[in-house]
Image (tube, rainbow, N blue to C red):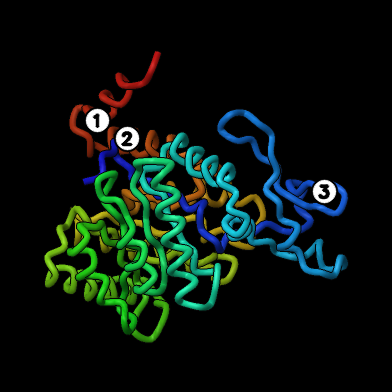
Amino acid sequence: MIEHRGIIVIGENLNTTRKIKGSSPRILKEGDRRGLPYTDLSGTKRMLDLTDAFPPDPKEHANAMIPYIAQCLRNKDLHYLEAAVQSQLHAGVHVIDLCVDEMSPYPDQRMEWIRWIVQTVQGMTDAIVSIDSSDPLTIEAGLKVHDSKKSRPFINSVNLEEGRSVLHAMAKEYGAYLAGNASGRSGMPYSAQERVDHLTELSKQMDAHGIPMEDRFLDALVFPVGAGPEFGMHYLDAVRQLHEMYPEVHIFGGHSNVSFGLPDRKVLNDAFLILSILAGCDTLMIDPIMNTPKEYLEFKLAAEALMGKDEYSLNYLAYHRSKPG
């Protein structure tokens, strides 16, 4: 069981899908080199070299989307990687999500990358690491090198798509926490009810494999509201139903997806995270540097006290007394 005070936080910042626009003011130019400045754990100023990730034609540089986490891995920039791990943990993350799917279209290479990052990150922390992939073989490769003496592994994620059901047995074999998402046999869900129906069927599969309720994380799938104004409510309505059906199961989503493509993403994420907590989420998958977990934990504890869900405000008082100073 993951120890927490009311909210479990999964840090999403080590996913190779993450990109930065070539014209971003965060990118520094030094002669012909381009990179992302950062400070390592010793306080030394460094730069994550992104030069090779830019397109050859300078005219395309401004609009290019640069995969900076993938470039960190290709460069084997351990200073940046460790800073990214520790900054998330310092912000209050319980689980570090690791996804290398965009490193290569070739399964053998993806498996090599997941082995490398799982072992490397476990050399930096004893925290739980999530092995995140759309390919069960990549997940299995990560599980095989995972050091369970440090922490239990976390699988992200099983669903109803063909070939994914083997992850139930892997979760049992390796003693892993198991995330299941609401994708169906024919693709993504189009409504709240489809999300609930898919996750209900997936939960029955978890029952059949003996996955404990407290080890299950149901992902109702967050889609960008910029692509469909109804997508936010589809997710929230599904979360409400799932929380009523499975009160002992952790409910979550990739919450920062909701603001993709829109300005001032932190503002939208803040509002959506609060709505998600009120709907029944006890787990958040976020960029913990942009959206600080402490704010949402304190909101949840205060809201439960105010709505009579925390008898005599005992959880709120315990949290308050535990704060330093």
Question: Relative to the observer, which residue lies in front, 66 or 9?
Answer: 66
What's the amino acid at mark 1? Answer: Asn
The answer to whether residue 317 is left or right of residue 36 is left
State which quarter of the image contains the C terminus. Answer: top left
- Using a 10 Å C-alpha cutoff, classify the residue at mark 1 as few (fewer than 14 neighbours), some (14 to 19) or many (20 or more): some
Q: CA distance from mark 3 to mark 2?
A: 45 Å
Q: Earlier in the sequence, mark 3 or mark 2?
A: 3
- Residue 94, quarter of the rendered image: top left
Residue 290 % position (x, y): 56, 44
Whether label 2 touches label 1, CB < 8 Å: yes
For disc 1, the marked residue is 315
- Disc number lying in front (3 or 2): 3
For disc 3, the marked residue is 29
Question: Relative to the observer, which residue lies in front, 24 or 200?
Answer: 24
The answer to whether residue 217 is left or right of residue 117 is left
For disc 2, the marked residue is 301
Whether label 3 touches label 2, CB < 8 Å: no
